[in-house]
Amino acid sequence: MELTVGQIVEGKITGITNFGVFVDLGEGKSGLVHISEVARSYVSDIKEFVKVGDAVKMKVLSIGEDGKISLSIKRALEPEAPAERRERREKRPSQPAKIDSSYTWTPKKNEPASFEEMMNRFKQTSDEKFSDLKRKNPEAKRSKRGSVK
């Protein structure tokens, strides 16, 4: 059987790793389904979706010059019907989380309470950093404004 990109094929899972699934396509050919191509949802553990020995349908994504075959299980699945998508969306909680009205915000100990305090703190740290730079760099001490070249 000659494989082409885009073709839907069936194979048997021969191995599972943390990055994907190895599949025997028959006639001495094998391929890899990357973890991102196993299911439409997020896959943290491949073993929750497939197991060794499962027969699965896959779509051929690419065939490398070295013979490596890249496959996708999720792209071989029937397209999801709009009604199914709508149902899945409706299952999500649509109401925002309830806010505890008894909670009152209080600033942290080191957090200034007013804009003026924040500006004073900024100016102070800025002046400290600038003086540190002057101490470390002797060239910065000299004024170059008055020199004419």
Image: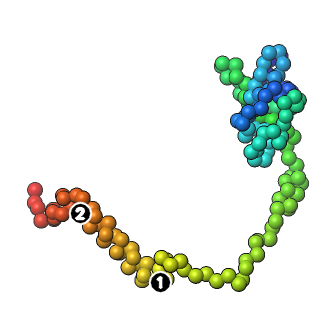
Q: Who's the residue at 85% across and 39% down the image?
A: 77
Q: Quadrant of the N terminus?
A: top right
- Residue at figure coordinates x 28%, y 64% from the top left: 132
Q: Position of residue 55 (x, y in %)?
A: 88, 29
Q: Quarter of the image holding residue 14?
A: top right
Q: Which mark is residue 134?
A: 2
Q: Is residue 82 visible?
A: yes
Residue found 78% across the figure and 28% down from its top: 15
Amino acid type indicated by mark 2:
Lys
Spot occupied by residue 89 in the image (x, y as percentages of width and height): 83, 59
Residue 113 locus on image (x, y percent): 49, 83
Q: Mark number for residue 114?
A: 1
Q: How is the image coloured?
A: rainbow
In the image, is residue 33 above or below residue 2? below
44 is higher (above) or lower (below) than 13: below
Q: Secondary structure at mark 2?
A: helix
Q: Secondary structure at mark 1?
A: loop
Please say if 95 is above or below 104: above
With 60 as the anchor, is 103 left or right in this view? left
